[in-house]
């Protein structure tokens, strides 16, 4: 088989794979979730194997402990979060009215110091920016809501995911060895090296960032609750969890928390304390949590991750969000590999560089 025929075969297979993922995106959710959990838990399972446990026993123990922790966590957290959400819905009209009054006061203060012409220009500019932004956010929220709705309606998710996780985790090494045996022999070592880089990127970002999000969620929830912010636990946990999207989580939490604080408190100090909680959280994330748990050499830029999550959600719903980071890691590694090939090819090197390389090899 020629190189061209191989390229056509691989390209056709990849396109068929994408088509199947798109068509089966709702069915694949529990399987992808189980695979992701197995990937996260595989290092712990390997550690238990090194300690002398069999793979089956290590898999059973790790899977049982993980899902028991998740269930207990949800049982403890669910009543608190549900109560705060219901309370938030009840108090939202009052908060909106309070914020509207404060904005009116601020507008009146501005009108006394700024000309009517400047105010009209500012309103026109904000209106032009607000319309497309609100339209986009509405579409994005609708897409996320539809994805979450699909998960809720799939009762099988709660049943199939633990089963998939167990079998994937038990047979992880066997599956990796089997896939490795399928690699083209001529290029096998090159492909293995790229896969190692992808795994390094995912291990550095996905596992590390998940821990960062969990710790940030706990910190924000506790901090905002201690300063007396209404719904501080909900705002804090949501801020931490969506911090998986760089900068967006912090921005969402800060705007939401400050809006509630301004409507709730009539004094400056509590509002300042709420802002201080988010400030300390940013310092912890940027200087301690992210460097220690994620590292600085994962090779995934923040803008690249944001684009991947949004594109994945738009194309495949919640399944696309789950697959976004692995796909972005693969694409990033492949782009760096192809760039390295280009920089060492005649397309980039001058004739002098090529002759120098040839002379050095001789």
Image (tube, grey):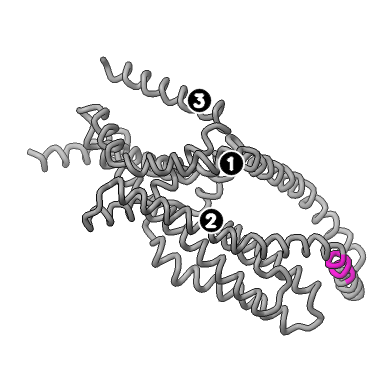
Task: Tell me: 340 left or right of 251.
Answer: left
Residue 85 percent across, percent down from the top left: 73, 61
Q: For the point 56% across and 65% down, which residue is it? A: 217
Residue 281 percent across, percent down from the top left: 55, 72
Disc 3 marks which residue? 20
Tag in front: 1 or 2: 2
Disc 2 marks which residue? 71
Q: For the point 61% across and 38% down, which residue is it? A: 154
How much space separates mark 3 and mark 1, taking CA atoms? 16 Å
Question: Dot 3, crowdedness within 10 Å: few (<14), some or many (≥20)?
Answer: few
**Secondary structure under badge 3?**
helix
Residue 35 percent across, percent down from the top left: 43, 42
The mark nearer the N terminus, 3 or 1, is 3
Disc 1 marks which residue? 318
14 over 161 or under it: above or below: above
Task: Tell me: 248 left or right of 165.
Answer: right
């Amino acid at each position: 088989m020629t190189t061209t025929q191989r390229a056509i075969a691989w390209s056709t297979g990849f396109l068929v794979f994408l088509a199947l993922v798109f068509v089966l995106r709702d069915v694949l959710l529990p399987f992808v979730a189980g695979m992701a959990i197995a990937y996260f838990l595989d290092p712990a399972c390997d550690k238990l194997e090194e300690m002398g446990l069999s793979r089956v026993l290590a898999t059973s123990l790790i899977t049982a402990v993980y899902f028991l922790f998740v269930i207990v966590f949800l049982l403890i957290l669910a009543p608190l979060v549900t109560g705060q959400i219901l309370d938030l819905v009840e108090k939202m009209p009052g908060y909106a009215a309070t914020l509207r009054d404060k904005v009116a006061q601020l507008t009146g203060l501005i009108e006394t110091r700024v000309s009517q012409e400047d105010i009209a220009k500012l309103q026109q500019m904000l209106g032009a920016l607000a319309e497309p932004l609100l339209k986009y956010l509405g579409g994005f929220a609708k897409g996320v809501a539809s994805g979450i709705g699909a998960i809720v309606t799939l009762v099988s998710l709660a049943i199939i995911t633990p089963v998939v996780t167990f079998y994937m985790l038990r047979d992880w090494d066997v599956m990796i060895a089997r896939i490795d045996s399928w690699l083209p022999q001529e290029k096998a070592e090159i492909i293995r090296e790229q896969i190692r880089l992808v795994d390094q990127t995912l291990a550095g970002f996905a596992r590390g960032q998940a821990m960062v999000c969990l710790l940030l969620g706990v910190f924000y929830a506790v901090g905002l609750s201690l300063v007396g912010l209404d719904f501080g636990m909900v705002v804090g946990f949501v801020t931490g969890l969506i911090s998986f999207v760089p900068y967006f989580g912090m921005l969402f939490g800060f705007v939401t928390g400050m809006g509630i604080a301004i409507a709730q408190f009539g004094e400056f100090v509590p509002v300042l304390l709420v802002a201080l909680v988010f400030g300390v959280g940013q310092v912890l994330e940027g200087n301690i949590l992210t460097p220690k748990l994620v590292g600085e050499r994962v090779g995934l830029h923040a803008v690249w991750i944001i684009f991947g999550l949004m594109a994945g959600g738009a194309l495949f719903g919640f399944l696309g969000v789950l697959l976004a980071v692995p796909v972005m890691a693969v694409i990033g590694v492949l782009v760096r590999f192809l760039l390295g090939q280009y920089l060492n090819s005649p397309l980039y090197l001058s004739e002098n560089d090529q002759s120098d390389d040839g002379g050095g090899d001789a």
